[in-house]
Amino acid sequence: MDLAFSNEDLAFREEVRAFVADNLPEDIAESVRRGRAVAKPDIQRWQRILFDRGWAAPAWPVEYGGTGWDATRRYIFDEVMAEFDTPETVPFGLLMVGPLIYTFGTKAQKERFLPGILTGEDAWCQGYSEPGSGSDLASLQTKAVRDGDHYIVNGTKTWNSSAHVADWVFCLVRTSNEGKQQEGISFLLIDMTTPGIDPKPIISIDGAHHLNMTYYTDVRVPVENRIGEENKGWTYAKFLLGHERNSIAEVGLSKQRVRRLKEIAGAEQFGGGSLRDDASFAGKIADVEISLTALEYLSLRFLAEEAAGRPIGAEVSMLKIKGTEIRQQLTELTIETLGYYAIPFEPEQLTDRWNEPPIGPDHAAAQMPQYLFSRAATIYGGSNEIQRNIIAKMVLGL
Amino acid sequence: MDFSLSEEQQMLKDSVQRFVRDEYQLETRRKLVASDTGYSEKNWAKMADLGWLALSLPEDFGGIGGGPVDTMVLMEEFGRGLVVEPYMTSIVIGGGFLMAGGSTAQKTELLPKLGAGELKLAFAYAERQSRFDLTDVEFKAEASGDGYILSGHKGVVFHAASADKIIVSARTSGGSRDRSGITLFLVDNNCAGLSRRDYPTVDGLRASELEMDGVTVGADAVLGQVGGGAALMDEVVGQAIAAICAEAVGCMDVLQETTNEYLKTRVQFGVPLSKFQVLQHRMVDMFMECEQARSMCYMVNLKIAEEDKVEREKAVSAAKVQIGNSGRYVGQQSVQLHGGMGMTDELHVGHYFKRLTMIDTMFGNKDHHLKRYADL
């Protein structure tokens, strides 16, 4: 057992620090600090900067444009990203469909899709859930019927984050009604500009437009955009869910939030001092910070296992459960710091269109929307109840 | 970054597992706990033979020179067996103090004996008013001629009855809650003026109330610097916490595995309990608590030798908070999921539950360390 970083690792950390300090655009950092949604062109601009440095995809193998870093380097990289106000990685391309394509895709698919993910030029979204298929995902009904070299897709997908700004969607569709419902699903990559695709906004409780209901009417998708075999889509979806859960611990993001929480608690007045000096509130911060440390070391253990060539099983679901619970605790504590100034609700304040002084303290406006939207974290990506079912069955054998 | 055990550590683990399997069946332990001494001298001698008592002691003084991770491996298996021999007090704490603060004369005289199983140590620190604050010390040491006169009361001194020497924290100067002015002394257990009231603890160990009334010791009884006891205690108690976290992880694993197995076999309403989703999710939460605790146990044992004091102390307190939370949840839920059987003295579940409950109290409970973490 050993946690010590080698001198090379320490030099690497300084190198990443220096790079981010010099290259993270101040306007993007400012958006992150203020809790504004980072717009697509800004996300692409930052991804392009990382790409030009060769750091677009820390976890990908070198042959596909990744860094080939070992677990320690990836950990250090994430740490440094969290030290700065860097935008959250959009998971759909880099963390989800990218690894799926380089693992199961054809040579042509790899050449066609991986570069756009790496440079950030192609934004992706996910087409899984349907109005009638939430936690019971395999019951999905969106149909893809073969017509020569194409599939004709008809149906409705929902909860599609960023579908309104995405260039591509990866979709689970039904290609057969034979056998078990899991056995008739295929995995398609669909160009969002194809005629017949129509995303409609779903406004969430934070007042914002992240989510969409997407209608597919006679959408023609070339057969060459299918990943792997027909009717084997469920296998690929499961692979991808595993990948998603591994990154979904979001330790770095939560560390960023702890830092922000302490700043805000330090700025909020209480009993003649600051809220951060209040013993009971300081205890609450310490409590969640300690849970986050435990999660960090749990995910490091998984990273080390993977690096040693031992694949992680269903226990990876723990990272999703703990990571999202901690994220929710942090957003909840942050609105608690605001007292009455959690109440004013003017989401316009978070846009460039707002040119009046802030209502209440400057840091207040973003917090309630973030708290509200964070409630989704324990629902998406397989709800935390589903994750517990998975661990009970696959790990504990219950 | 590596979380795997070395070959030697794996061998050590196997060997302790064998010991626990052979010597620590619940019935055997029950007899040990009820015996006069409360543990087995035979086991202690065996631990000496196997090199476990010398494991963490320095090679220059007859030890093996192992590190915190070696102790962690040992303590985790001791936790699985609910081992009652005074390893923690005598070796981790007693040996820790000698290594961290002992003079060359003290090390030369005592460390080889400690590793050979010929000497046992205890640590007397708690007082009625001190609660978990190691530096709240009223117990007095007054300079007298070349030596000191010790007077005062120490509470819940683990394994004092079986110890040959007791390490006592005493105030040599300053007010009763000052960090400075605390000095540690090595006192013979049978010296004049020392009286003990021995009793069993709820988790099957032994402890004592200690009274000293004008005990005379020489200057050579001082352990470490005069007035410098606080820093020494921080260091050694930190190591003890790292070790007890490993013991707790061992206890929790047994409870988690046993309860999981029980749910699969116990049939009610015509199905095994394991088929009820509400119980499945409880088991998953217990499993996650075990894994979080294990992660923090690795973390603290890898950081306990860290030079940066604040980093080290934060790691210690964070781990103790996690162990407190996880231990309470896993312990209480194991009793709950075993139903009436969980309440019986006959089943091992209750004994692990009691040990975990006491581990939270040892060296400061969750609240104490949460506050300490926030203040660091």
Image (spheres, coloured by chain):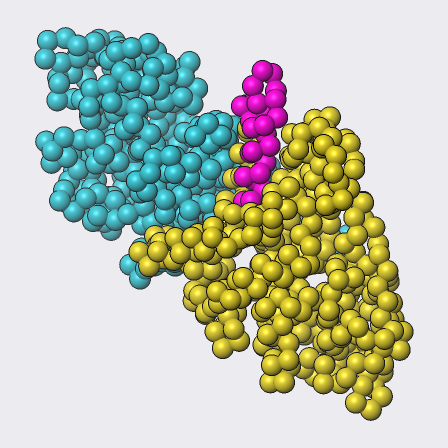
Chain colours: A yellow, B cyan
Q: Residue at x 60, y 48 (%)?
A: A27
Q: Position of residue A127 (x, y in %)?
A: 77, 67
Compared to residue A137, the image places residue A14 above or below, namely above
Q: Is B359 within the magenta? A: no
Q: Which residue is the extreme one toward the front?
A: A355
Compared with B108, B12 (above or below) is below
Residue B135, percent from left and from top: 35, 20
Q: Image check: B275 left or right of A103?
A: right
Residues A276 and A4: in front is A276
| Residue in the picture at 63% in, 51% down | A321
Residue in the foreground of this view, choosing between B25 and A162? A162
Asked if one can make out residue B290 in the rendered structure from this viewpoint, the answer is: no
Q: Which residues are magenta?
A: A255-281
Q: Quadrant of the N terminus of chain B?
A: bottom left
Name the residue located 43 percent from the left edge and 64 percent from the top edge.
A70
* Chief secondary structure of the magenta portion: helix
Where residue A248 sits, quadrant-wise, is bottom right
The residue sitting at 70% across, 67% down in the picture is A124
Residue A318's place in the image compared with A215, above or below, is: above
Residue A107, picture quadrant: bottom right
Image: B261 above or below A93: above
Q: Residue furthest right?
A: A217
Residue A263 falls inside the magenta stretch: yes
Give x and y (percent) for residue B290.
53, 48
Residue A202 lies left or right of residue A97; in this view the side is right
Query: Percent x, y for residue A296?
Result: 50, 49
Q: Is residue A289 visible?
A: yes
Judge left or right: residue A2 versus residue B295.
Answer: left
